[in-house]
Image (cartoon, rainbow, N blue to C red):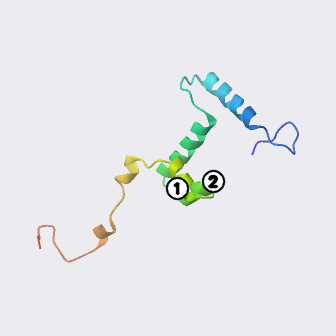
């Protein structure tokens, strides 16, 4: 994703880590976070904004969907917005009916 000094080579994982730590220091971030934390946050934000888990799996390069499910957690905000398919059924009952 990021080119190195030589255009045909990518920068190393260690270089990414150093650049990230430097950026955190400049931004005044005090928490001990890593590039992995950034990746996890990215996936979580995508999930919370409604991106399908399958797309997140593809973006993260996971072969197994179980890996993506572990990587991302489901927020309570999204769980409360899920509607049951039963809510869409019109059974001819009024709200006051108790059959």
The kind of secondary structure element at disc 2 is: helix
Q: Is residue 36 left or right of residue 16?
A: left
Question: CB under 8 Å between callouts 2 and 1?
Answer: no
Q: Is residue 72 left or right of residue 38?
A: left
Q: Residues within 10 Å of mark 2 (few under 14, many from 20)?
A: few
Q: Residue 96 placed where, x, y %?
A: 11, 67
Residue receiving disc 1: 51
The kind of secondary structure element at disc 1 is: loop
- Label 2 and label 1: CA atoms lie apart by 11 Å
Residue receiving disc 2: 59
Q: Residues within 10 Å of mark 1 (few under 14, many from 20)?
A: few
- State whether residue 37 is above or below residue 61: above
- Which is more N-terminal, label 1 or label 2? 1
Q: Residue at x 60, y 42 (%)?
A: 39
Q: Nearer the viewer, mark 2 or mark 1?
A: 2
Task: Classify residue 33 by image quadrant.
Answer: top right
- State whether residue 85 is above or below residue 14: below
Which label belongs to residue 21?
Answer: none
Q: Residue at x 63, y 36 (%)?
A: 35
- State whether residue 71 is above or below residue 82: above
- State whether residue 59 is above or below residue 85: above
Task: Classify residue 15 by image quadrant.
Answer: top right
Furthest residue toward bottom = 92
Q: Is residue 51 left or right of residue 11?
A: left
Q: Residue 14 placed where, x, y %?
A: 73, 33
- Which quarter of the figure is the C terminus placed in? bottom left
Q: Residue 19 placed where, x, y %?
A: 71, 30
């Amino acid at each position: 994703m990021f080119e190195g000094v030589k255009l045909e080579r990518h920068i190393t994982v260690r270089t990414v880590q150093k650049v990230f730590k430097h950026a955190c220091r400049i931004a005044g971030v005090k928490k001990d976070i890593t590039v992995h934390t950034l990746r996890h946050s990215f996936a979580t934000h995508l999930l919370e904004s409604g991106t399908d888990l399958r797309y997140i799996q593809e973006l993260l390069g996971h072969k197994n969907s179980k890996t993506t499910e572990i990587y991302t957690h489901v927020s309570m905000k999204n769980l409360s917005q899920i509607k049951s398919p039963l809510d869409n059924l019109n059974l001819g009952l009024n709200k006051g009916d108790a059959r």
